[in-house]
Image (spheres, rainbow, N blue to C red):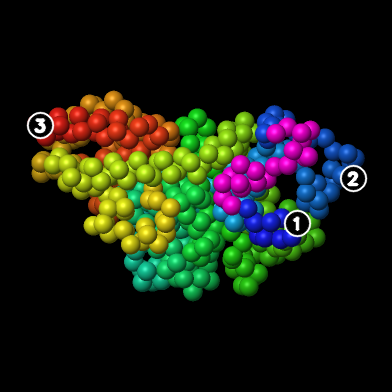
Amino acid sequence: MSESADRPSRSFATLQVQAGFSAATAPAAAVPPIYQSNAFEFTSLAHARDLFAHRVDGDVYSRTANPTVAVFEQRIAALEDGVAAVGLASGQAAVALTLLALCGRGGHIVAATQLYGGTIDLLEDTLPDWGIATTFVDQDDIAGWRAAVREETRVFFAETVANPLAQVLDVTAVAGAAHAAGVPLVVDNTIATPYLQRPKEFGADVSVHSATKFIGGHGTVLGGAIVDLGTFDFTADPQRWPALTEPSRRVPGTSLADRFADSSPLIALIKAKYLHDLGPSLPASSAFALLQGLETLDLRMQRHSASARQVAEHLATHPAVATVHHPALPGNAWHRAARTYLPRGAASVFSIDLHSTGDPRADFDRVETFISALQVLRLLANIGDARSIVTHPASMTHSHLSAPQLAAAGITDTTVRLSIGLEDPADIIADLDRALALVCQS
Ligand SMILES: *Cc1c(COP(=O)(O)O)cnc(C)c1O
C-alpha cells in the first residue's frame, strides 16, 4: 500500500504476515479468526438500508463480504501494491469475473495463446456463448497484439509466467500495446506469485491469481483473487465503460466510478454485480487457509525457485532429456526476460521434453515408463503444492486442445511438466534420475 505518515511503508515479509488485520478489530485474537457466519447483524433498519445501497461499507452476507475473506483481500492487495482486491472460490472464477466485468455485452479480448488450459476453454467455449470473442496472439509478438485490436476490444490478457513451458511475458511491451489501444492489461500472476513479480512495476493494470497454487501452497483449498492495481483510469473514456461510469442500479443515484473513486470501481463492480449475481464466493475457512499460506510465501517461493533451478540444471545434462524449458538456463529463449521480470528467482513450474522416438505410440510408452517409476514426484493435476508434482500435458491439462493449438503452445507428446515442491532437492533429483535411467534402456 502507499506510504503515508500514519501507515509507513513495510517490506514484503511484514505485509505477508500482518497486512489487512489488526487485533483491535477482533477481540485481541492474534490470528485472523474464521468468521463462520452467513450474515451480519445490522445496528438498525436505516443501517441495513445504507449497506444495501452501498452508501456505507460493511458486511451484509458472506456471498459478497465476510471479515475473514476481507483480511485475505487486503493482504493480497498490499503484497501487489494494489488499491483493492476480491477473493473468490477459485482461480477460474477470478479469470471469468474479471473478463465478464471488463467486456460487458459484446466485448472483445486479445489474449496470449500461451494460457492455462481452463482459461482457453473459457475463452473458446463459454464466453462466445455470451457474445464475447477472443483473438489469440503469440505473447511475444508485440505487433500481433497491436494488430488484433478492434473497436470492441476491452482487455488484453496474458500470464506473467505461462505453463507448462515457463515462458516469461514481456509485461512492459504488452502493457504499452494495451494502453495504446485504450484498454487495460490483465495478467494472471499465479505462477510467479506477488513474491517473484509485482506486475504493477511493469505496467499491468489488474492481476488475477489461482490462490489454489502457491498462495495456499499446501494443496488443501481452492481460491482465487483479483487485484486492481489502480493504474487504469476508466473515466478517461467513459463511453467505453458504461457499467462503471453510468448510473448503476447497484448504487442508486450514482455511478460506481463516483461512489468508489477512492478505492476501486472495478472491484466494486465485480463484487456488487458479478459475485453477487453469479455467486462464486470464497469460503471463510478457505480464506483462513490462504492467509496461513501467505504468511510463509517468501520462504516457500525461495525454496521452490532454488530447488527448481537445481533440478533444471541437472536435467539439462541428462542424456534422456532433449530439452529443459526453464528460464534460469542460459540457452532458454526467455532467459533475458526472466532476469528483468523475475529478479528474485524463476518459477518452479517448468517442463522437459524426453527424446522422441519419432513414433507417437512409442513416445507415449516412454512417458508412461518414466512417470510410473517416479516415487517422490506425484502424478496429479495441480501445481504450486508443497509436494513435487509430475503431469503429462498432452494427456491431462492440455488434452482438450487441438493438434495445432498444442503445437502453438510448444507442447509435444514427450513434454512432461514438473512442479518442484519443498522436499529435499537431492531426493527429487535422485527420483528423476532413477526413472530416466529406465527411459534410456527403453
Ligand atoms: C490453476 C490455474 C488457474 C485456475 O485456478 P483454479 O483455482 O484451479 O480454478 C488459472 N490460471 C492458472 C495459471 C492456473 O495455474
Helix, strand, or loop for circle 2?
helix
* Residue occupied by mark 3: 442
Q: Quadrant of the C terminus?
A: top left
Residue at image location 9% in from the left, 31% down from the top: 441
Q: CA distance from mark 3 to mark 2?
A: 75 Å
Q: Which mark is residue 46?
A: 2
320 sits to left or right of 133? left
Q: Residue at x 61, y 46 (%)?
A: 14
Kindly indicate whether the residue at mark 3 contacts the one at mark 1 (C-beta within 8 angstroms). no
Q: Report, in whole angstroms, how far the alpha carbon at label 1 lies from the one at label 2.
A: 32 Å
Left or right: 275, with 126 as reference point: right
Q: Residues within 10 Å of mark 2 (few under 14, many from 20)?
A: few
* Residue holding disc 1: 6
Q: Position of residue 4 (x, y in %)?
A: 71, 61
Q: Is residue 97 visible?
A: no
Q: Does the beta carbon of the residue at mark 3 sit less than 8 Å from ligand 1?
A: no
Which region shows up in magenta?
Answer: 11-30
- What's the amino acid at mark 1? Asp
- The residue nearer to you, when weighing 53 against 323, is 323
Dot 1 or dot 3, earlier in sequence: 1
Decide which of tag 3 and tag 2 comes sooner along the chain: 2
Amino acid at pointer 3: Ser
Quadrant position of the N terminus in the picture = bottom right
What kind of element bears circle 3? Answer: loop
373 magenta-colored: no
**Residue 243, image x, y percentages:** 65, 60
Residue 160 is at least partly visible in this image: yes
Mark 1 lies within 8 Å of ligand 1 (Cβ measured):
no
